[in-house]
Amino acid sequence: MELKVESKQKVEGEIRVPGDKSISHRSLILSSIAEGESKIEGLLEAEDCLSTMGIMRDLGIEIKKEKPGSYRVQGKGLNGLEEADNVLDCGNSGTSMRLLAGLLASQDFYSVLTGDHSLRKRPMQRIIGPLSRMGAQIWSRRDGLAPLSIRGQKLSGMEYKLPVASAQLKSSILLAALKTEEETVIIEPAVSRDHTERMLIGAGIDLEIQADRITLKKAKERKLKAFNIKVPGDISSAAFFITAALIAEEGELLIKNVGLNHTRSGFLEVVEAMGGRIELLNQKDQGGEPTADILVKASDLKGTEVGGEIIPRLIDEIPIISVLAAFAEGETVIKDAEELRVKETDRIAAVVKEFKKLGIEIEEHEDGMVIAGSAEVEGGISVKSYHDHRIAMSLAVLGLKSQQGITIEGSEIINTSFPGFKGLLEKI
Ligand code: S3P
C-alpha cells in the first residue's frame, strides 16, 4: 500500500494517540496469569498487540471485547495456561516473542513461537542464553533465530547482568522467574522501560528496585492479583505528531493523555535541548504511570547530540528524531544507538538510505548517524518503509515539510502499532 503525504505549512488541532504498545502487551500477558477477572481499557488494538491477544487465547485464556479498547480477561493464575494445539504466531512483534518465550519457558508444556519474515531475522539468542541458564529448554534455528520451540521446565532463579539495556530481555527473564522459588536479580547497564516491574508490583509481586538492580524476592509460590488498567496514550506514537507540529511553519497542537514514564520520555528531553516549544498540561498519575496533555508549538530548532544513558529511554523515537534533526539549524549527532540495527529493520541503514534519496545530508556510523540540518526537501518521489512501522511514519511526517510531498511505499506496516495514523495526520 502507498501513502501519499502532501506538503503542509500549518499543523493544528487536538488529538489523542492510541494506547501504549508496551503497556498493552503486558496488560494482556499479566492479566492472563493473574487470579480472576481483570479489566483493560484503552488497549492498543494494533497488529502487534492483537498477536499477543491471539496467543493468550490459544493458551486457553478467555478475553472478551466489550467495546473498542475495552476488554475483560479471565486470568487463570500462573499454573492455568494450557498447551496450544498449534504454532503461536507473533507476527511482526518482538515484544510478543521475547516476553512470551520467558513466560512459556516455565510452563509445563510444549510451545512453538514464530513470526513474520522480519521477526524471524531478529536476535533471540539474547533471551535463549539467560533463560537456558535458568534451566529452560529452547531450540532455535542457527544463530538463535526463530521459530523457537520451547519445552517448558521447572526453572531456577539467578543473578544476571544484562549485556544490553533491553526491556524485552529484562521482562522475559522476570516472567520466567515468576514460577521459580529462588530469588532472581537482574542488573541493567542502563535504565530501560520499566512497565513490567510497575505492573508486577501493582499485582502484588514482591519486587525490589534499587538503581540498576531489580530483585524478585524468594517465594514458595507467587500469585498475581487481577487488576483494572487504563492504558495511557503511547509517547512513541505521540512523537510523530509532536514532530509534525514542531517542524511546521505555524500552528499549535494539543495531544491529550500521553504516558510520560521517565524510562520512556527521553524524546521530550531531546526536543527541549533542540529548542522545541512544548508544555505539559494536566499532569496526573494514571494507575501507576504518569500522564499529561502535551501542547506543541511550531518552533525554530537547533541541532544537538543524543547518546549515552538516554538512548534506551528514546530507542523507538530515533527515526523521528532524525526528522527533527534534518530541519534543525546545525548538526545533530546520534551515537551509542547500535541497537537500532536489530529492530524491525536496520533503522540506521534505512534512515540514511531514504534521507539520501531525498537529498538530506546524513552520514552513517556503526552506532548512529550525523545529520547536517537545515534541509530543503524537494520531494515528489517515493521512499520505502522497509517493512518497519516507525520508518514509514517518520517518512510520512517528513513529507509534510517537503515541497512536493512524498509517497511512502509499504505503508500498511503502520498498522502494527498505529492503525489510525493516516486519519490523525489528515486531521492535523
Ligand atoms: C519494548 C522494548 C524495546 C522497544 C520495543 C518495545 C517493550 O525493545 O524497542 O518497541 O515493550 O519492552 P528492547 O527492549 O529490545 O530495546
Image (cartoon, grey):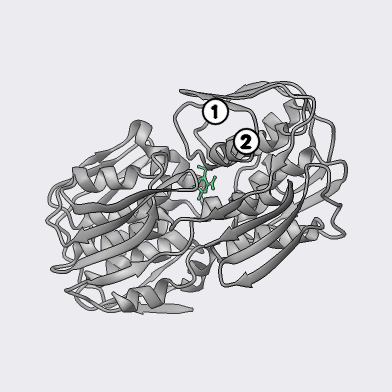
Q: Which residue is mark 1?
A: 163
Whole-percent x and y of residue 140? Answer: 75, 44
Whole-percent x and y of residue 121? Answer: 62, 51
Whole-percent x and y of residue 44? Answer: 54, 62
Per the model, the C-alpha gap separating discs 1 and 2 is 8 Å
Helix, strand or loop status at disc 1: loop
Whole-percent x and y of residue 386? Answer: 48, 63
Helix, strand or loop status at disc 2: helix
CB under 8 Å between callouts 1 and 2? yes
Q: Which residue is mark 2?
A: 126
Residue at 74% across, 21% down: 182
Amino acid at circle 2: Arg
> Which of marks 2 and 1 precedes in the sequence?
2
Amino acid at circle 1: Pro
Compare residues 225 and 109 and report the one nearer the observer. 225
- Is residue 187 in view from this perspective? yes
Residue at 28% across, 57% down: 294
Residue at 67% across, 62% down: 72
Quadrant, the C terminus: bottom left
Mark 2 crowd level (few <14, some 14–19, many ≥20, 10 Å Cα)? some
- Is residue 142 in view from this perspective? no
Count every numbered label the image shows and give the total: 2
Location of residue 85 by image quarter: bottom right
